[in-house]
Image: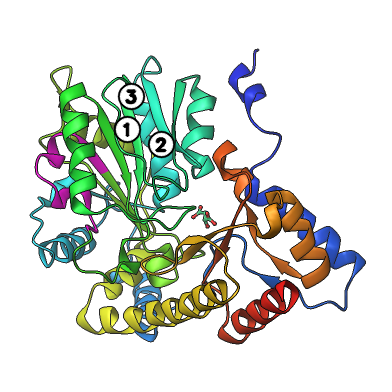
């Protein structure tokens, strides 16, 4: 028996686990210190009332013989796929129901989709990058190319014709930088992928945070995208499902490589390896897309947007350079006084008792940068900014 040797090439632990251990160690030594967490992008507001009601009703259905549900369709119940279809339609994107696959979240699908793609493919990712895109490809032994995201390009790298890649990861609004591609920039990526016969894996997990109506919330708003892109989306951040788990992946019918439709391959993979999201959770997810559900989740999104505004105002006041925050729950700031990102992490944790994520954890280009999230409690957010600006004075 041999292990998958590629696992030896991974960092020793997943970024957010490393941070959680550091914070736990600090808290153990300093039990009386109030630590404010702005590290991992985990939500703090509870599920919306309509979602809870739907979940409760569905649980009651499961407890009655006549309405009990056993195995469901692996790719999701029609009622939820129709709700997602309608959500896209309200943004002028037409999808067939069978192009939508319900999952337990974007992270799993972003990793699992690689099952249907050859390990011979070359992968292109931005640097800095959400570690899942890199780690899942290291696990499979794929060659990874990095493109520079930096202050000069606003952390929004554009295609370089000289680079030959087969699989391209894009995330907009971006995790970790909060930067958002406009339509013209995203169209350049679609055109590049079509010309190189490459596949874009588009992570739209943060689309609901876009307030500027000129910015694309789905790659399928762009001409030709259905022939070169798969889109991943999640209710984790949109509707507080980080612990509830539900997302969806759109694999267009028009997506064809080597004479094979990826939609069919993904269906084949899912029916073999996945038994679907629990009925109760799918009912809860469907409630998010109801008229009242949309109203309620938008209230929560506004709460986080207001947190982000408090944070960006504080950064502006302190003269710190940053991206994100306006159409994104992430704020990506340059560390003050030329500090390194782990150095700033230690300072924040030990002196100010605030947890953030060191930019370096997302790649070389994150050196000297730092990510904070707007998902916290309002009073904690204000307090954290007071501690930071007080320190920088
Ligand atoms: C993050 O903090 O980057 C996210 O919470 C990670 C995730 O969504 O998996």
Q: Which residues are magenta?
A: 216-230
Q: Quadrant of the N terminus?
A: top right
Residue 114 lies in quadrant: top left
Query: Which residue is at a point 35% across and 74% down the rendered structure image?
Result: 58
Nearer to the camera, 175 or 141 = 175
Residue 279 lies in quadrant: bottom left
The kind of secondary structure element at disc 3 is loop
Callout 3: CB less than 8 Å from ligand 1: no
Of the numbered discs 3 and 2, the one sitting upstream in the chain is 2
Query: CB atoms at circles 1 and 2 under 8 Å apart?
Result: yes
Q: Which residue is mark 3?
A: 117
The kind of secondary structure element at disc 2 is helix
Q: Residues within 10 Å of mark 1 (few under 14, many from 20)?
A: some
Query: CB atoms at circles 1 and 3 under 8 Å apart?
Result: no
Q: Label 3, label 2: how many angstroms apart (C-alpha)? A: 10 Å
Q: Which residue is mark 2?
A: 112
Q: Which residue is mark 1?
A: 269
Spot occupied by residue 219 in the image (x, y as percentages of width and height): 21, 49
Question: Does 67 sit above or below residue 149?
Answer: below
Question: Does 106 sit above or below residue 157?
Answer: below
Q: Residue furthest right?
A: 29
Spot occupied by residue 287 in the image (x, y as percentages of width and height): 28, 75
Number of numbered tags placed on the structure image: 3
């Amino acid at each position: 028996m041999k292990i998958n040797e590629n696992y030896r090439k991974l960092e020793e632990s997943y970024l957010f686990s490393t941070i959680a251990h550091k914070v736990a160690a600090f808290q153990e030594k300093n039990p009386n210190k109030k630590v404010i967490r702005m590290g991992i992008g985990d939500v703090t507001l509870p599920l919306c009332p309509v979602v809870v009601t739907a979940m409760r009703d569905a649980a009651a259905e499961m407890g009655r013989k006549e309405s009990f549900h056993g195995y469901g369709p692996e790719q999701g119940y029609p009622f939820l796929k129709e709700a997602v279809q309608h959500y896209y339609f309200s943004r002028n994107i037409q999808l067939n129901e069978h192009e939508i696959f319900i999952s337990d979240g974007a992270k799993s699908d972003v990793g699992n989709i690689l099952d249907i793609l050859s390990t011979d493919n070359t992968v292109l990712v931005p640097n800095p990058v959400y570690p899942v895109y890199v780690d899942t490809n290291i696990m499979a032994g794929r060659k990874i190319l990095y493109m520079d995201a930096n202050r000069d390009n606003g952390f929004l790298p554009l295609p370089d014709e000289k680079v030959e890649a087969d699989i391209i990861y894009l995330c907009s609004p971006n995790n970790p930088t909060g930067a958002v591609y406009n339509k013209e920039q995203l169209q350049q990526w679609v055109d590049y992928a079509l010309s190189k016969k490459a596949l874009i894996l588009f992570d739209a997990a943060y689309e609901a945070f876009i307030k500027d109506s000129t910015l694309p919330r789905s790659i399928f708003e762009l001409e030709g995208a259905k022939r070169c892109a798969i889109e991943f989306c999640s209710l984790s951040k949109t509707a507080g499902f980080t612990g509830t788990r539900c997302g969806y992946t759109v694999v267009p019918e028009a997506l064809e490589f080597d004479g094979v439709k990826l939609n069919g391959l993904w269906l084949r993979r899912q029916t073999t390896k996945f038994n679907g999201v629990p009925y109760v959770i799918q009912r809860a997810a469907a409630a998010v897309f109801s008229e009242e559900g949309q109203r309620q989740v938008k209230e929560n999104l506004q709460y986080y947007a207001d947190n982000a505004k408090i944070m960006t105002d504080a950064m502006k006041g302190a003269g710190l350079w940053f991206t994100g925050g306006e159409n994104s729950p992430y704020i990506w700031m340059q560390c003050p006084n030329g500090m390194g990102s782990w150095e700033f992490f230690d300072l924040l944790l030990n002196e100010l008792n605030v947890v953030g994520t060191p930019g370096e954890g997302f790649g070389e280009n994150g050196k000297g940068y730092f990510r904070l999230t707007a998902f916290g409690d309002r009073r904690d957010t204000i307090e954290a900014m007071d501690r930071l600006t007080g320190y920088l004075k």
